[in-house]
Image (cartoon, rainbow, N blue to C red):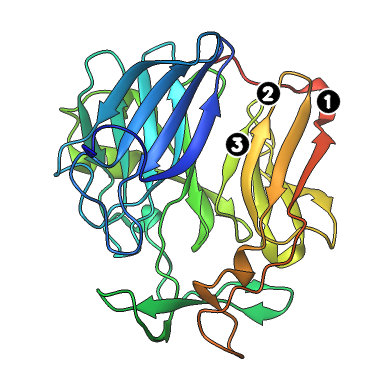
Amino acid sequence: MEETKGFTTAVDIVTNRIFQSTISGYGGLLLGSSPGGTKLISVDLNTNSTIRTYTFPTNVALPVSFFSDVTFDLVNQFAYIADLSPEQQNAIVVLNLFDGTSYRVLMNDVSVMIEPGFVPFIYGAPLYQVLYSPSGQIYGYGNIKNGVSGVTLSPDMETLYYSGGGIRFLYCVPTQLLRNNNTPPSEIVSAVRNLGQQGVSGVITADSQGNVYQGNSVNDGIEVYNVTTGYTRNFVHDPRINFISRLIIAADGYLYFTVTQFHLLPSIYQGFGELGKDRRQKPYVAFRIRLPDGATLRGT
C-alpha cells in the first residue's frame, strides 16, 4: 500500500461545526515515520468520503517526528500541529489548508522542549520511557523525552496556545506571525509568552470564552487558565482521573475527556516490575463535565 493512502497509525480525530472530520495519521510505529505516512485527511461526515489528503515534505514531517495534536483555524484556512518528537526534534507545524504548503516554527525552542531531567508522577509513582532497539527489543528505560503535544486556538484565532506532558508551563504565540512563512524565527520566539506553571498534561483545549483547559495528572484533575485574570485554578478533581489523553468541548456546553491509563502502557515503566508489561485494566472511561459561565464550543 502506498504510504500516502490509508492509515498506519491514526493519532487524532477532530470534528468541526460543518460536519467535517480531520484525521491525523502518524506514519510509523516504533521505528519512526516513513515519507508520505504522516498526513491529515479531511472527511465529509455526511457522505463518509475523503475531501482532501494533506501530506508533508520530509523537512516538515521528519523521520523522528510524531504529530500528536492538531487545531484548526477555518477562518484563515490554517492548521497548527504539535510535533512531540521523542527524539527531541520538537516544533509547531503550520499547514496552509488552501494550498497545502507546510513548514516548521519554534524548532527546538525551549517552549516546545521537555524540561531536562523531567519525571512525571501519577498516583505517586514515577513514569519512565521503556527503551527499544531499532529491531524493537527492550533494552532498558530512561526519562520521557516527548516535547510539545497539545495545541489549541483562541476564539478569534489570533492566539495559539501550546504545552506538553513534559513541559511545566502553558505558552502562547500570535498566529499572525505563524501564518506568514517569511516571519523571521527570532521574531516568533520573541513573541512567545509564558502564561505560568501548569500540571502534567499532554492535551489542552479552549472554550468560547477563551479559557484554556488542561489535564493535571499529578493532582487527579483538570485545571483552567482564565484569560481575563491570567491565573490558573483547579476545575475538577476526581481520584478516577489519571492521564487525560483527549479534551473535547462540544456544542452542548460540556467538556468531554478520556482517561486511558497511559501510565500503565507497556511503553511506560513505573520504576518497579517487569519492563514492557501492559498493566491497563478495562474498562477505559470517558467523562463529561459542564463548562462554567455558559461557555461552549468556540466558533470553528
Asked which quadrant contains residue 133, the reply is bottom left
Q: Tell me the kind of residue under disc 3.
A: Thr
Residue at 46% in and 44% down: 11
| Distance from Cα at disc 3 to Cα at disc 2 | 12 Å
Q: Is residue 60 left or right of residue 24?
A: left
Foreground mark, 3 or 2, reads: 3
Q: Which residue is mark 2?
A: 209
| Distance from Cα at disc 2 to Cα at disc 1 | 9 Å
* C-beta proximity under 8 Å, tags 2 and 1: yes
Residue 96 appears in the picture as rendered: no
Task: Identify the disc placed on residue 17.
Answer: none
Q: Tell me the kind of residue under disc 1.
A: Asp
Q: Which residue is mark 1?
A: 293
Is 262 drawn above or below residue 15 in the view shown?
A: below
Q: Tell me the kind of residue under disc 2.
A: Gln
Q: Which residue is mark 3?
A: 205
Q: Residues within 10 Å of mark 2 (few under 14, many from 20)?
A: some
Residue at 58% in and 43% down: 204
Could you say whether the residue bearing mark 2 is in a helix, strand or loop?
loop
Labels 2 and 1: the sequence-earlier one: 2
